Image (cartoon, coloured by chain):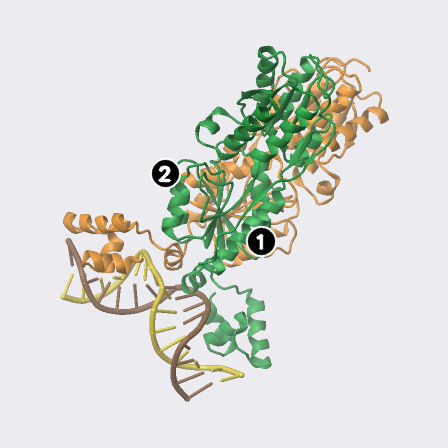
Chain colours: A green, B orange, C yellow, D brown
Amino acid sequence: MNIGEIARRAGVSRSTVSYVLSGKRSVSEGTRQRIQAVIDELGYRPNASARALKEGRTRTLGLVIPPASQRLTDMQLGFVASVVEAAARHDLDVLLSPSGGDHDRSFERIVTGRRVDGVILMEIRLADDRVLRLTRAGLPFVTIGRTAEPHGMSWIDVDYAGLIARCVHHLADLGHRQVALVNRSEELVAAGYGPSHRALAGFRAATAERGLTGVEVCCGDDTASGEACVEQLLATCPDVTALATINEAALPGIQRALTSAGLSVPGDFSVTGVAARHWAEDFRPPLTAADVPMVEMGAEAVSFLLEIIATPGVVPRHRLYRPPVSLRSSTGPARSR
Amino acid sequence: MNIGEIARRAGVSRSTVSYVLSGKRSVSEGTRQRIQAVIDELGYRPNASARALKEGRTRTLGLVIPPASQRLTDMQLGFVASVVEAAARHDLDVLLSPSGGDHDRSFERIVTGRRVDGVILMEIRLADDRVLRLTRAGLPFVTIGRTAEPHGMSWIDVDYAGLIARCVHHLADLGHRQVALVNRSEELVAAGYGPSHRALAGFRAATAERGLTGVEVCCGDDTASGEACVEQLLATCPDVTALATINEAALPGIQRALTSAGLSVPGDFSVTGVAARHWAEDFRPPLTAADVPMVEMGAEAVSFLLEIIATPGVVPRHRLYRPPVSLRSSTGPARSR
DNA sequence: TTGTATGCGTTATCAT
DNA sequence: ATGATAACGCATACAA
């Protein structure tokens, strides 16, 4: 079933069928209808590979996600969903590439095989080999997150440093003198994961500015780690009265450890941070937190990417999201434990 | 950068380069090395579209997921991750198609545009238009979940009926006389979502067999819904002493409602069901539940699909998973509230 | 308004 | 052991 078959049955040439499909040339109403009838009857759709070969574009976007082996966080999942949805609105398909390290067959295939028109890179590190590979390949790309030196490339990111700083200031205003930062996992920090490092920087700057004592802890992306982490924090640092976190997956565990210790929130202990809205709302009491706008970010990443694809030499764009910290009920005046 | 350029630089014909790449014809060691050197130097990789056009296969699998707008459940995410990982092991890429209803451009593109060699269909309904469309298109496919009449097609599924029945029997053995089933959302049930209907069937059969009173409730896939649902259940049916659920995302809410009501688990109330392991383990106390083996299921779906692709006329295969109910600590002898 | 011819980059058949 | 060449299915420049 190809365009020639349609042409044969409609008694026209292949180009006429092609032009009916694309509308790039006027076709008399009669033949147009006759051709369309054949197309509808046979359910013909052009072969995507042939079209891609001819046009030099695949109408497909690549989305590089963390290796599938490790469970995606809700935030990562939110990005994936919003990117896929935004792409679908533009009639674009999304090819998934689970890639972590530097040597990844899937990533390599996508980049050098011209399988996609552009790539959205998630979970990039401060120094990320993949941006270099994409640049060398001349493939348009946008990152969600940014490298240490993001000049000259397009990216979308959340201002973790600013948001965590704002959380610390909020806690300082409430009279807290010793506060903790519950970060992501040690492995991620060691790998140079941007949000972790920037949150740390914001935390240090703000605690220093306000003369607070800051405690920094790493924590895996799951309930058990969150619980263990806060248990240890409470045992080790008896004067800590509040924490800020960028680790939403640890929140249920954080809650559990606080409850087990007989600490009420925000009476005895305050909690705040950066999290997807539903994590903040599921916390008890609802979490005072900056809500990461995943849907907008995914859509904007697609939008930036399409712009680069359409206009190769276009000046790179970027956007640093700094959503407001929604005041809910998990922070209150300091009270020594 | 194409195969002709490589041939030119190596001073050979394009076919020789092609044969070096595929190994389908012997090439003298000298020229082979010379060609390989040029390939490595320029980082050449064959154009995927041209290859797909010529070979008639795309080395890509389609994965149909629920519309991206609604958050994926952890189980769905687990399937996606395991399918992507299994595909990567076979050097196959995965094209995502968010598709719910019957009229979906993305699904249509994938099916009729020959963009993929085969499709894995998730979240199918008892009567699902998409299997018909795939069958008509002659595109190999495997479903995770099964239709009402799955004869003649390949599928992987979890035996929700059997597992929920087993949970009910377990509760009956412990002396519970009134038990509830916390199902997925009403919308899903109304749409003919297989797991919901089969869980219901198993629940009814088992409660009838053991002479129990069964209460059936629907519940959204989130914490708040779980909490509201159990609150209402406790208020409406004071004699219910246990529940079984297939709604893992509701578990935190279920827990919260039980705690709020001052009910201890399993002392005052027993909870069991079907859930991904991490949900069961995060429950307090750990949930006695059937652990859905998402990784194996995704891998087996890919395996089935590859078999169909390789041998078009092959007899369809299927597999009904019936994982054991892991005894943890959330079920105990009945005690009236 | 419509038809003819060419080439996108690859693989594979047929020659040599 | 290697080269020339014909498709694969489509879009489009060029003719008529």
Q: Quadrant of residue B108?
A: bottom right
Mark 2 to mark 1: distance in Å? Answer: 30 Å
Query: Compared to B307, does B238 lie above or below?
Result: above
Instruction: State which chain disc 1 sits on.
Output: A
Identify residue for label 1: A88
Instruction: State which chain disc 2 sits on.
Output: A
Left or right: B83 with respect to B333?
left
| Residue B196 in picture, x, y percent from top left | 69, 36
Residue drawn at (57%, 24%), measured in percent from left and top?
A: A208
Q: Is residue A91 visible?
A: yes
| Residue B122 in picture, x, y percent from top left | 58, 43
Q: Which mark is residue A103?
A: 2
Nearest to the observer: residue B270 or residue D15: D15
SS under mark 2:
loop
Q: Are marks 2 and 1 on the same chain?
A: yes
SS under mark 1:
helix
User: Dots 2 and 1: beta carbons under 8 Å?
Assistant: no
Query: Compared to A273, does C13 lie above or below?
Result: below
